[in-house]
Image (spheres, rainbow, N blue to C red):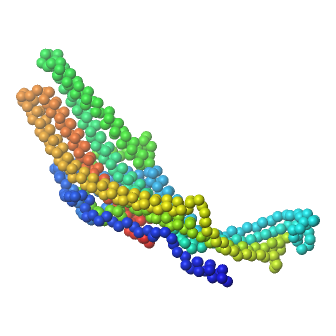
Amino acid sequence: MPFITILASLLLAGCTVGPDFKKPAAPDVSDYTARPPATTASSANVAGGEAQRFAKGGDIPADWWTLFHSGPLNALIEQSLNSNPDLKAAQAALSVARENVLAGRGAYYPGVTAGVSASRQQDPPGALAPVPSNNAFLYNLFTPQVSVSYVPDVFGLNRRSLESLKAQEQAVRFQAIATQVTLTANVVVAAIQQASLQAQVEATHQMIDIDTRMLGVLRYQFAKGYAGRLDVAAQESQLAQVAATLPPLLKQLAQQHDLLAVLAGRFPSQAPDEKFELPGLQLPQDLPLSLPSALVAQRPDVRQAEANMHAASAQVGVAIANRLPNILLTANAGSTALAIGQVFKAGTGFWSLGADVAAPVFQGGTLLHQQRAAKAAYVQAAAQYRSTVLTAFQNVADTLAALEQDAEGLKAAASAADAAKVTLDLSQRQWKDGYAGYLSVLSAEQAYQQARINLVQAQANRYVDTAALYQALGGGWWHRAEPAYPAPTRNADEK
């Protein structure tokens, strides 16, 4: 009776050792930059030149890429979400984490095993060991039995272990979400870059054609004595320099083509047929700008770092519980008989109840240092969480700066292209009227094509910056229908 009383007291007084995790507070900042962003500059009559306005506190749609109003882009992203192997691997990792949580819950329940043993034995006639009541020295022995063992979670070892597993599942879940957000952003950027490179390749071909015609004119003039050898050599150098810029552009274009195929889960030789052009993309004009206090709940990498911090906190409790006494309750019941038909008859049964209490006394400092290591791991996870938060805010601030400055850059590039076009028109008019040579026309056309290349690059920057902002703000994953992606709210498991 005293033993049962003591045991019951221990079970009722069960506690959970270690720190209780508290989610970090949102950063106490009101803006991402020292100067809040304003409406960006606009460029008239240029694709991607619209002014963009920021809606502070605005929400991010789940399918934000549809705001570019490109059917081929939407189709390619859907195919990527269905076939990308990295995303499938992340989803499989989430299934592994879920099963580990379910497996960890088994520690709350008693373990039950059942078995049957059968043996044929022969004892020597002079043996001192007991023999069956019929004094037979050669006999069969059948023993079916059931064993039950249970470890009461007196100090919360099982609770902290399961808490850690749940936090690890959360970390894997947000890693899968980050993979999905990154995938969609990469597809959008790759499509934009493909469109930009294609336009640059076309302009470079035209520049090479212009320089080739200029060289032909100069060679003719040199043969007639109207131009010097220095002029011919300078034009040959110019043509060679422009021609040298074409292979790198073609290489980048091929690489973007292959990248789009792989992102869509295809081999490069099976790349999708979609071709993208910058005029076929519409620049979103109203951009959401989440509140800084909401960013930590929206960014999957921040949520993953928080879950890692939670898991490390629970591991501190596991390490502390491992240094405390452990109680094992056991029960056995069965039957022993000389014939299989007698195992359940009266007089053949046996049973036993037991309780073991074991406490670590000396482990060479192993358990102590494991506890200290767990605490240091928590400090590490907390520092990594803060670093992740700072990086998230930096991403948003950098993107806001890029949106503002690249809008100004596009405005300047558009003005330069317009000026180059005016120069080309005037040169052509003067050449037709006999006031200018053909070389001046070719030179003006060459300057115009270079201005076009700069304009295309500036246009692509604005589209890329817009995609980067949606990614930096979390990508709107909380609006997706997948049950694997929980909304950015706190549930009971995250307290």
Residue at the image point whose x is 17% and y is 41% from the top: 417
Left or right? Give the position of 434 relative to 488.
left
Left or right? Give the position of 396 relative to 367.
left
Q: Where is residue 366 shown, x and y percent of the image?
A: 56, 59
Left or right? Give the position of 44 relative to 162.
left
Q: Which of 198 and 377 is in front in this view?
A: 377
Residue at the image point whose x is 40% and y is 57% from the top: 384
Tell me which corner region of the image, top left, top right, bottom left or bottom right, holds residue 426: top left
Quadrant housing the C terminus: bottom left
Check the image and report above or below for 190 versus 209.
below
Check the image and report above or below for 249 versus 95.
above
Q: Where is residue 285 shown, x and y percent of the image?
A: 23, 57
Q: Where is residue 302 shown, x and y percent of the image?
A: 38, 60
Tell me which corner region of the image, top left, top right, bottom left or bottom right, holds residue 78: bottom left
Q: Which residue sits furthest bottom?
A: 1
Residue 246 visible in the picture? yes
Q: Which of 200 and 13 is in front in this view?
A: 13
Residue at the image point whose x is 26% and y is 33% from the top: 205
Quadrant housing the N terminus: bottom right
Q: Where is residue 428 shown, x and y percent of the image?
A: 11, 33
Question: What number of labels is visible?
Answer: 0
Q: Which of 403 and 327 is in front in this view?
A: 327
Residue at the image point whose x is 53% and y is 70% from the top: 159
Check the image and report above or below for 362 versus 352.
above
Left or right? Give the position of 477 relative to 107.
left
Q: Which of 28 and 298 is in front in this view?
A: 28
Tell me which corner region of the image, top left, top right, bottom left or bottom right, holds residue 239: top left
Q: Which residue sits furthest right?
A: 125
